[in-house]
Amino acid sequence: AEMVLGRVNKSLVSMVESLGVKAIGISGKDGGLLKVKKKYSDGKDIGYVGEISEVDPQILFDMMEKDFLPIICPVGLDEFNTYNINADDAACAVARAVGANKLAFLTDIEGLYRDFNDKSSLISEIKVSEAKELIAGGTIGGGMLPKLSNCIDAIEAGVSRVHIIDGRIPHSILTEIFSDRGVGTAILGDTEEKYYHE
């Protein structure tokens, strides 16, 4: 897994460099960035899967100070072993640690739906309290449930807004962040002002 993730990381670095941005691929192991503990699922050992226990963002600050974009491979260390980390979990933990204002998740769906089977029910913007109600109501399931939970955690840790964006659309990040309605879903803190009013 580490070898494959490392290969993907370096291909992302190449892609970003080809756009004229200075980038560096690093692992969560580098500079003690991501410290983890072994993760268990319902008390069962699921192998070398880690849960982040601590983030030391100093290496990121050092790179950004020199105008390099860090591209992070989601693996980390405990005292002895290397662990694979869920990429969404890693992104949220890093966003909290660096005090990010915005966090974006690129995915392969349009965004968050009130009813996944009804594509007209795409939610452009939602407050954290409303997102919690959707989760409690059981309408959110599958792979979107942990992603939405991560979004809520990030907002509660100080990120002002989190975007779930369809990465299949060209320039989707720019469209989402710089337009009123965007192309995905923005999750906002309860005190944040909505841009788009349905």
Image (cartoon, rainbow, N blue to C red):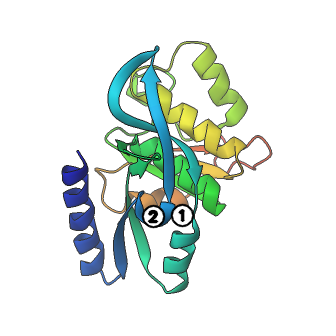
Give the vertical position of 122 relative to 100 (above or below). Answer: above
Q: Position of residue 65 (x, y in %)?
A: 55, 83
- Nearest the eye: 177 or 63: 63
Q: Can you tell which quarter of the image residue 132 is in? A: top right
Residue 103 visible from this viewpoint:
yes
Query: Within 10 Å of the Cα at label 1, are there few (<14), some (14-19), or many (20+) other Cα atoms?
Result: few
- Residue under numbered circle 1: 178
- Nearest the eye: 108 or 69: 69
Q: Position of residue 138 (x, y in %)?
A: 54, 12
The answer to whether the residues at label 1 and label 2 have Cβ atoms under 8 Å apart is yes
Q: Is residue 22 left or right of residue 147?
A: left
Residue 182 visible from this viewpoint:
no
What residue is at 42 percent from the left and 50 percent from the top? 76
- Residue under numbered circle 2: 174
Number of dots carrying numbers:
2
Q: Amino acid at mark 1?
A: Phe
Give the vertical position of 99 relative to 150 (above or below). Answer: below
Query: Within 10 Å of the Cα at label 2, are there few (<14), some (14-19), or many (20+) other Cα atoms?
Result: few
Q: Secondary structure at mark 1?
A: helix
Q: CA distance from mark 1 to mark 2?
A: 6 Å
